[in-house]
Amino acid sequence: MDPLSGELTTLREFRTTDLDDYLAIAGDDRVTTWMAFDSYDRAKAEQNLAGIVQRSGQEDRPDYMLAVTRPDDDHVIGFARIAPSGAWGAKLGYAIGADHWGHGYATDASRVLLRFAFSELGRHRVTAAIGPENEASIAVVKRLGFTYEGHLRDHVFTNGDWRDSLLYSLLEGEYSAK
Protein backbone atom coordinates (compact mmCIF):
# COMPACT_ATOMS: atom_id res chain seq x y z
CA MET A 1 0.00 0.00 0.00
CA ASP A 2 1.29 3.45 -0.89
CA PRO A 3 1.63 6.01 1.91
CA LEU A 4 -1.40 8.18 2.64
CA SER A 5 -0.77 11.90 3.04
CA GLY A 6 -2.46 14.55 5.12
CA GLU A 7 -1.52 18.14 5.87
CA LEU A 8 0.50 17.31 8.99
CA THR A 9 1.06 13.57 8.72
CA THR A 10 1.98 10.73 6.42
CA LEU A 11 0.60 7.27 7.14
CA ARG A 12 2.69 4.36 5.90
CA GLU A 13 3.08 0.66 6.50
CA PHE A 14 5.04 -0.31 9.59
CA ARG A 15 8.47 -1.90 9.18
CA THR A 16 10.26 -4.10 11.71
CA THR A 17 12.95 -1.39 11.86
CA ASP A 18 10.35 0.89 13.52
CA LEU A 19 10.64 -1.07 16.78
CA ASP A 20 12.30 1.65 18.88
CA ASP A 21 9.81 4.31 17.75
CA TYR A 22 6.88 1.90 18.22
CA LEU A 23 8.05 0.94 21.71
CA ALA A 24 8.41 4.61 22.67
CA ILE A 25 4.65 4.95 22.09
CA ALA A 26 3.22 1.53 23.00
CA GLY A 27 5.49 1.29 26.04
CA ASP A 28 4.64 4.73 27.45
CA ASP A 29 2.11 4.73 30.30
CA ARG A 30 1.10 8.30 29.41
CA VAL A 31 -0.18 6.95 26.08
CA THR A 32 -1.47 3.51 27.04
CA THR A 33 -3.54 4.82 29.93
CA TRP A 34 -5.98 5.79 27.14
CA MET A 35 -5.61 2.59 25.12
CA ALA A 36 -7.29 -0.81 25.25
CA PHE A 37 -3.97 -2.45 26.16
CA ASP A 38 -1.35 -2.14 28.88
CA SER A 39 2.09 -0.72 28.12
CA TYR A 40 4.34 -3.10 26.21
CA ASP A 41 7.84 -4.15 27.17
CA ARG A 42 10.36 -4.56 24.34
CA ALA A 43 9.57 -8.26 23.76
CA LYS A 44 5.81 -7.62 23.57
CA ALA A 45 6.33 -4.60 21.27
CA GLU A 46 8.56 -6.66 18.98
CA GLN A 47 6.00 -9.48 18.87
CA ASN A 48 3.12 -7.10 18.20
CA LEU A 49 5.03 -5.17 15.52
CA ALA A 50 5.90 -8.43 13.75
CA GLY A 51 2.18 -9.25 13.70
CA ILE A 52 1.33 -5.83 12.27
CA VAL A 53 3.91 -6.27 9.51
CA GLN A 54 2.69 -9.81 8.79
CA ARG A 55 -0.98 -8.73 8.58
CA SER A 56 -0.11 -5.87 6.24
CA GLY A 57 1.08 -8.41 3.66
CA GLN A 58 -2.16 -10.36 3.63
CA GLU A 59 -4.31 -10.02 0.53
CA ASP A 60 -7.50 -9.81 2.62
CA ARG A 61 -5.95 -7.99 5.55
CA PRO A 62 -8.06 -7.70 8.72
CA ASP A 63 -6.98 -4.12 9.46
CA TYR A 64 -4.80 -1.23 8.38
CA MET A 65 -2.50 -0.43 11.29
CA LEU A 66 -0.31 2.33 9.93
CA ALA A 67 2.68 4.27 11.22
CA VAL A 68 2.09 7.99 11.63
CA THR A 69 5.05 10.14 10.60
CA ARG A 70 5.51 13.78 9.72
CA PRO A 71 5.90 14.53 6.00
CA ASP A 72 9.48 15.73 6.50
CA ASP A 73 10.62 13.00 8.93
CA ASP A 74 10.19 9.21 8.63
CA HIS A 75 10.35 8.56 12.41
CA VAL A 76 7.14 7.10 13.81
CA ILE A 77 5.32 9.55 16.10
CA GLY A 78 2.15 7.51 16.43
CA PHE A 79 -0.06 4.89 14.89
CA ALA A 80 -3.52 4.91 13.37
CA ARG A 81 -5.77 1.99 12.60
CA ILE A 82 -8.87 1.42 10.55
CA ALA A 83 -10.39 -2.04 10.94
CA PRO A 84 -13.21 -3.08 8.62
CA SER A 85 -16.11 -4.42 10.67
CA GLY A 86 -18.99 -6.23 9.04
CA ALA A 87 -19.96 -5.54 5.45
CA TRP A 88 -20.09 -1.74 5.67
CA GLY A 89 -18.51 -0.60 8.92
CA ALA A 90 -15.05 0.14 10.25
CA LYS A 91 -13.47 0.95 13.60
CA LEU A 92 -11.06 3.86 13.99
CA GLY A 93 -8.25 3.99 16.52
CA TYR A 94 -5.14 6.11 16.94
CA ALA A 95 -2.36 7.00 19.34
CA ILE A 96 0.24 9.73 19.19
CA GLY A 97 3.40 9.69 21.28
CA ALA A 98 3.00 11.90 24.35
CA ASP A 99 5.89 14.15 23.30
CA HIS A 100 3.89 15.02 20.17
CA TRP A 101 0.49 15.74 21.73
CA GLY A 102 -1.27 19.00 21.03
CA HIS A 103 -0.05 19.56 17.46
CA GLY A 104 -3.07 18.21 15.54
CA TYR A 105 -1.43 14.95 14.47
CA ALA A 106 -4.25 12.70 15.75
CA THR A 107 -6.88 14.79 13.97
CA ASP A 108 -4.92 14.87 10.72
CA ALA A 109 -4.10 11.14 10.77
CA SER A 110 -7.73 10.30 11.54
CA ARG A 111 -8.92 12.54 8.70
CA VAL A 112 -6.58 10.67 6.34
CA LEU A 113 -7.90 7.29 7.52
CA LEU A 114 -11.51 8.43 7.17
CA ARG A 115 -10.87 9.44 3.56
CA PHE A 116 -9.33 5.99 2.99
CA ALA A 117 -12.21 4.18 4.74
CA PHE A 118 -14.98 5.95 2.86
CA SER A 119 -13.29 5.98 -0.55
CA GLU A 120 -10.86 3.07 -0.97
CA LEU A 121 -12.57 0.66 1.43
CA GLY A 122 -16.13 1.69 0.54
CA ARG A 123 -17.29 1.86 4.15
CA HIS A 124 -20.61 3.42 5.13
CA ARG A 125 -20.01 3.88 8.86
CA VAL A 126 -16.91 4.41 11.01
CA THR A 127 -17.00 4.14 14.80
CA ALA A 128 -14.60 5.14 17.56
CA ALA A 129 -14.80 3.86 21.14
CA ILE A 130 -13.08 6.22 23.58
CA GLY A 131 -12.56 6.17 27.34
CA PRO A 132 -14.82 8.79 29.01
CA GLU A 133 -11.83 10.54 30.63
CA ASN A 134 -9.94 10.91 27.34
CA GLU A 135 -11.05 14.47 26.63
CA ALA A 136 -8.41 15.07 23.95
CA SER A 137 -9.53 12.06 21.90
CA ILE A 138 -13.19 12.98 22.30
CA ALA A 139 -12.30 16.45 20.97
CA VAL A 140 -10.64 14.83 17.93
CA VAL A 141 -13.71 12.87 16.88
CA LYS A 142 -16.03 15.81 17.55
CA ARG A 143 -13.77 18.02 15.41
CA LEU A 144 -14.11 15.43 12.62
CA GLY A 145 -17.92 15.47 12.82
CA PHE A 146 -18.57 12.24 14.71
CA THR A 147 -21.85 11.86 16.62
CA TYR A 148 -22.08 10.50 20.16
CA GLU A 149 -24.06 7.26 20.21
CA GLY A 150 -23.82 5.89 23.71
CA HIS A 151 -21.96 4.63 26.74
CA LEU A 152 -20.48 1.11 26.68
CA ARG A 153 -20.10 -0.22 30.22
CA ASP A 154 -17.02 -2.30 31.14
CA HIS A 155 -16.05 -2.28 27.47
CA VAL A 156 -12.31 -3.00 27.76
CA PHE A 157 -10.04 -4.48 30.40
CA THR A 158 -6.85 -2.44 30.58
CA ASN A 159 -4.33 -1.35 33.17
CA GLY A 160 -5.74 -3.84 35.67
CA ASP A 161 -9.36 -2.73 35.56
CA TRP A 162 -12.48 -2.58 33.43
CA ARG A 163 -13.02 0.66 31.56
CA ASP A 164 -16.12 2.10 29.99
CA SER A 165 -16.07 3.56 26.49
CA LEU A 166 -18.08 6.25 24.78
CA LEU A 167 -19.15 5.29 21.27
CA TYR A 168 -19.01 7.82 18.45
CA SER A 169 -19.78 7.32 14.76
CA LEU A 170 -19.50 9.07 11.43
CA LEU A 171 -21.57 8.07 8.41
CA GLU A 172 -20.41 8.25 4.82
CA GLY A 173 -22.94 10.97 3.95
CA GLU A 174 -21.88 13.08 6.91
CA TYR A 175 -18.25 12.78 5.86
CA SER A 176 -18.99 13.66 2.24
CA ALA A 177 -20.75 16.83 3.38
CA LYS A 178 -17.44 18.25 4.68
Image (cartoon, rainbow, N blue to C red):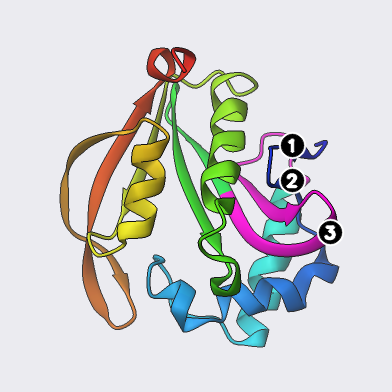
**How far is the residue under mark 1 from the one under mark 3?**
13 Å
**How far is the residue under mark 2 from the one under mark 3?**
9 Å
Q: Pointer 1 and pointer 3: residues touching (CB < 8 Å)?
A: no
Q: Earlier in the sequence, mark 1 or mark 2?
A: 1
Q: Earlier in the sequence, mark 2 or mark 3?
A: 2
Question: Overall secondary structure of the magenta stretch?
Answer: strand
Q: Residue at x 84, y 59 (%)?
A: 74
Q: Position of residue 92 (x, y in %)?
A: 46, 43
Q: Amino acid at mark 2?
A: Thr
Mark linked to residue 4: 1
Q: Earlier in the sequence, mark 1 or mark 3?
A: 1
Q: Is residue 76 magenta?
A: yes
Q: Pointer 2 and pointer 3: residues touching (CB < 8 Å)?
A: no
Q: Pointer 1 and pointer 2: residues touching (CB < 8 Å)?
A: yes
For disc 2, the marked residue is: 10
State the SS at label 3: strand
Q: Residue furthest front?
A: 103
Q: Please provide the residue range marked out in magenta.
A: 57-80
The residue nearer to you, when weighing 18 against 160, is 18
- Res 4 → quadrant: top right
Crowd tier of the residue under label 3, counting other residues whose Cα lies within 10 Å: few below 14, some 14–19, many 20 or above: some
Q: Position of residue 108 (x, y in %)?
A: 58, 42
- Res 79 → quadrant: bottom right
Q: Position of residue 158 (x, y in %)?
A: 33, 74
State the SS at label 1: strand
Residue 87 is at least partly visible in this image = yes
Report the side of 95 relative to 172 (left or right): right
